[in-house]
Amino acid sequence: MSLKPPPLRNDCFALPPGVDWTPVDQALNMLEDRLTPVVGTQSAPLAQAMGRVLAQDVRARRANPPEANTAVDGYGFAAQSLPDGDVVLPLISGRSAAGAPFAGAVPAGHALRVLTGAALPDGVDTVVLDEDCAVDGGQVAFRGGIKPGSNTRRAGEDVAEGQIALAAGRLLTPADLSLAAAVGLSVLPVYEKLRVAVLSTGDEVVEPGAKAAPGQIFDANRPMLLSMIARFGFEPVDMGRVADDRSALRTRLDEAADKAHLVLTSGGASAGDEDHVSALLREAGAMQEWRIALKPGRPLALGLWNGAPVFGLPGNPVAAFVCALIFARPAMGLLAGAGWDKPQGFDVPAAFSKNKKPGRREYLRARMRGGQVEVFKSEGSGRVSGLSWADGLVELEDGARSVAPGDLVRYIPFGSFGL
Ligand code: AMP
Ligand code: MG
């Protein structure tokens, strides 16, 4: 069973006429407007539903809790039957335990031994905690002033039967699976996993660990992008490396578009002689070079290849990483049925100073230490070690900004991006 959504339009990445440098927010708005889910739906048992995207609202088949029960070990009675002041009640024989409810009713003015999770029998609406009681054989004594309903849980107080327990688009977490189980669901409607192909380009790029001639560098982008995709809960499709050769790249893009819903390439995305990703997308008539006012970032080439969206990320690993988080990630979320997700940032005191010129948004490799945010010692976009050092990004707005130590700056932990 795989319901196919309509294809994306060939001009879905077209920029309005006259647009040159696109502010980050405008670029994000355009992606949000134009992309739609491209995945079909299927069912997943709870054990396989973690990290999947819920395809429909699901309703509680049973209330949680299903019946009124006691939240503690103690003694249950009807609050109305209590005298004023301190209380001594005769205990009736028997008890109510979780999974072994008391069959009879508790008469007014009497109490029953109850254990955590036990259903409240007829005649019990309030429970007094063990520690607040004195008991001898047939009686229980405790101080007056107990509020009616104390230490009990009402039926359906958490979730009512038939109520929407989880909403469509939700990226399922362990807590969601607990909730689904609690309300009687064992199989959930989910979207098919988004398959994302990753392809590195460049004559100079060789496989990590291989023999590298002078002038060659190891492919630092593919391991990063493939693992990022897996972390987001999508299915990475490794399309390897391809040289700066137009026909080889054309063949590989065909394969990638065939195997995956979306293709991420790195390198070759600007307008130079060896920038074959952008050249091919342009040739296919479905290419837009987005000159986004972003540091580190440009260039970003967006296009459709045989109907599959292609994100042509910059070759530089730091820029590829930032563009993947800022642009590709929310776009993938939409394509995957999870809706558009804006990462949560926090305003925290800076442990650094910086004068930023107006014109483009900047993302700095950053980490939290002692309640303040530090930035990496170098903004050099070739410094891959800074990515590894960081545990998040500092986002500096598009306009000019002067930051002094102690000023609040927006910090977005990698966790907010789902890493
Ligand atoms: P390009 O966007 O192809 O002009 O590449 C920009 C820079 O990123 C160049 O210095 C490339 O050598 C480098 N680069 C491209 N792809 C990779 C990769 N997969 N791993 C590491 N560096 C890369
Ligand atoms: Mg290149």
Image: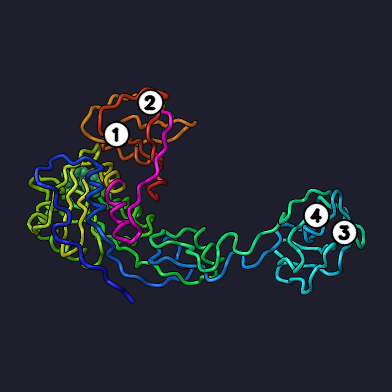
* Residue toward you, 166 or 285: 166
- For the residues carrying marks 4 and 1, which lies nearer the camera in this image? 4
Mark 2–mark 4 distance (CA, rounded to whole Å) = 55 Å
Alpha-carbon neighbours of circle 4 within 10 Å: few (<14), some, or many (≥20)? Answer: some
Residue 136 in sight: yes
User: Disc 4 on helix, strand or loop?
Assistant: helix
Disc 4 residue type (three-letter): Asp
Q: Quadrant of residue 153?
A: bottom right
Mark 4–mark 1 distance (CA, rounded to whole Å) = 58 Å
Which residue is drawn at the image coordinates 81% and 68% (left, top)? 106
Can you tell which mark lies on residue 89? 3
Mark 1–mark 3 distance (CA, rounded to whole Å) = 68 Å
Give the mark nearer the N terminus: 1 vs 3: 3
- In the rendered image, which residue does mark 1 sit on? 397
Mark 1–mark 2 distance (CA, rounded to whole Å) = 16 Å
Residue 91, horizontal then vertical, whole percent: 87, 63
Which residue is drawn at the image coordinates 37% and 22% (left, top)? 404
- In the rendered image, which residue does mark 2 sit on? 352
